[in-house]
Image: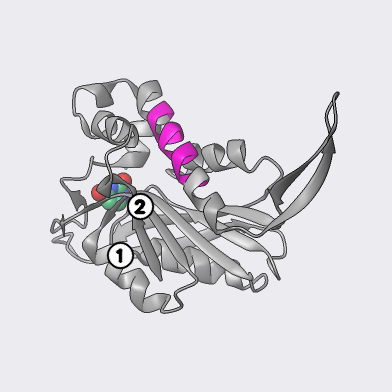
Amino acid sequence: MKVINLSAKNTILNKYLAEIRDVDLQKERMRFRQNIIRIGHVEAYEASRYLDYAEKEVQTPLDKCSVAVPQNDIVVGTVFRAGLPLHQAFLDVFDEADNAFVSAYRYYLDKECTKVGVKIEYMATPILDGKTLILVDPMLATGESMELAYKAFLTNGTPKQIIMACVIASKQGVEHLRKCFPDENVILICGAIDPVLNERKYIVPGLGDAGDLMYGAKETKE
Ligand code: URA
């Protein structure tokens, strides 16, 4: 797996990342979602470097011109619920893409909340044979939800190319995916890679719970 860490270079992306991490700015939910979308646009542009291109002739009002355009049949795949703004960002850029959705949620396996399980319940996807599957999930913590989402999607066909994108990854999550995807043609695009996971498997420094910051806290009536 080839890992691309976009914040290793100084670009405007770092401003968007700084804003989504900022505990005061996080109070504005719309701004938080909008910044995730702006990061997604940058990541989708990065992903476009790895597609296959062919020349297409276009007639302008003045003359013909030849333009190299992507040929891939793209499917953007997302994990509910936190993946939705990032998904929309990729769909803005790859506007003809098909779409795949899977619901995955984290739950704690022990009372101390140190072991996390990921449950997959719902899936809606086109057939993936021969397609370019772009899997997006904003927070790559342990890497298990990305892995499980991928395995769930695989039950509906074998993509010819896999590109994954996250906003913030942990080093541990990246290493987990490296083991799952030893093939160098698999691409992982990260906005930033943070050093640790805490005992509750949150990325540190990270930004907190991305889904809650986008859509509000989850509440369960006992
Ligand atoms: N999911 C989140 O929203 N945040 C984390 O830090 C890890 C997983």
Classify residue 24 by image quadrant: top left
In percent of the image, x 24 and y 32: which residue is there? 18
| CB contact under 8 Å: marks 1 and 2 | yes
In percent of the image, x 41 and y 37: which residue is there? 39
Mark closer to the chain start, 1 or 2 = 1
Is residue 123 shown in magenta?
no
The magenta segment: 34-44
Which mark, residue 22?
none
In percent of the image, x 40 and y 67: which residue is there? 2
Label 1 belongs to which residue? 174
Q: Quadrant of the C terminus?
A: top left
Disc 2, SS = strand
Q: In this view, does 222 lie to the left or right of 86?
A: left
Query: What percent of the width, then of the height, locates residue 78?
Result: 52, 51
Task: Assess disc 2: are there few (<14), some (14-19) or many (≥20) residues with their C-alpha within 10 Å of its C-alpha.
Answer: many
Separation of residues labelled 1 and 2 (CA atoms):
9 Å
Q: Main secondary structure of the magenta part?
A: helix
Is any part of residue 11 visible from this angle?
A: yes
Disc 1, SS = helix
Is residue 37 shown in magenta?
yes
- Front in this rendered view, residue 163 or 144: 163
- Front in this rendered view, residue 107 or 212: 212
- Front in this rendered view, residue 9 or 159: 9
Which mark, residue 190?
2
Query: What percent of the width, then of the height, locates residue 201?
Result: 21, 57
| Amino acid type, label 1 | Val
Q: In this view, does 64 lie above or below 155?
A: above
Q: In this view, does 220 lie to the left or right of 103?
A: left
Q: Quadrant of the N terminus?
A: bottom left
In percent of the image, x 24 and y 22: which residue is there? 25
Q: In this view, does 206 lie to the left or right of 72?
A: left
